[in-house]
Amino acid sequence: MERKRYVTDFKRVEGLGAAHDGVEHWWQQRLSAVALVFLTPFFLFPFARTLGQGHEAMRATYGDWWNAAIAILFVITSMWHLRLGLQVVIEDYVHSKPVRTAALVANSLLSVAVAIGGVFAIAKIAFGA
């Protein structure tokens, strides 16, 4: 004998969705976008100013702790934002579960690898190694 559950419609849908993290994901993407609005000009202007001037000019620019810190924050934030955005696209448009899982893992690994590589490169320039 099946027991009947007397639950209101609101109680049935209460929460953050099927994955229980929809609102958090949405907020993370919005916060990273706002952070990038402020970080992008502070990253691009020093970078564009030294483009084409050679390695020594780049070392001089990113030898300054402020420019190096902004560049590191920009790389980390942009890779975080990229991972979040691609995750939504993959979840929405890849319907095969094994392919979706592989794409989500590759998305996370690639984003982390690029972030680590970027931070390492900036730190290497900043510390003159």
Image (cartoon, rainbow, N blue to C red):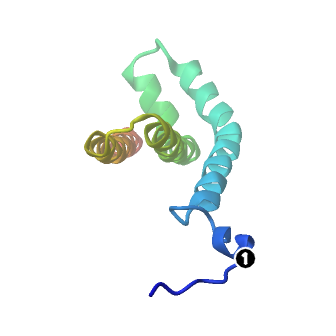
Hey, what amino acid is under mark 1?
A: Thr
Residue 115 appears in the picture as rendered: yes
Q: Position of residue 94 (x, y in %)?
A: 39, 36
Q: Position of residue 113 (x, y in %)?
A: 31, 44
Q: Position of residue 127 (x, y in %)?
A: 37, 46
Q: Residues within 10 Å of mark 1 (few under 14, many from 20)?
A: few
How many numbered callouts? 1
Left or right: 4 with respect to 102?
A: right
Residue at 57 percent of width and 20 percent of height? 48
Left or right: 124 with respect to 2?
A: left
Residue at 47 percent of width and 38 percent of height? 86
Q: Position of residue 111 (x, y in %)?
A: 38, 42
Residue 123 appears in the picture as rendered: no
Q: Which of the image's four quarters has the N terminus? A: bottom left
**Secondary structure type for disc 1:** loop
Q: Could you say which quadrant of the image residue 13 lies in?
A: bottom right
Left or right: 65 with respect to 35?
A: left
Q: Nearer the viewer, residue 70 or 88?
A: 88
Q: To which residue does mark 1 refer?
A: 8
- The residue furthest front is 1
Left or right: 98 with respect to 59?
A: left
Image position of 90 with respect to 19: above or below: above
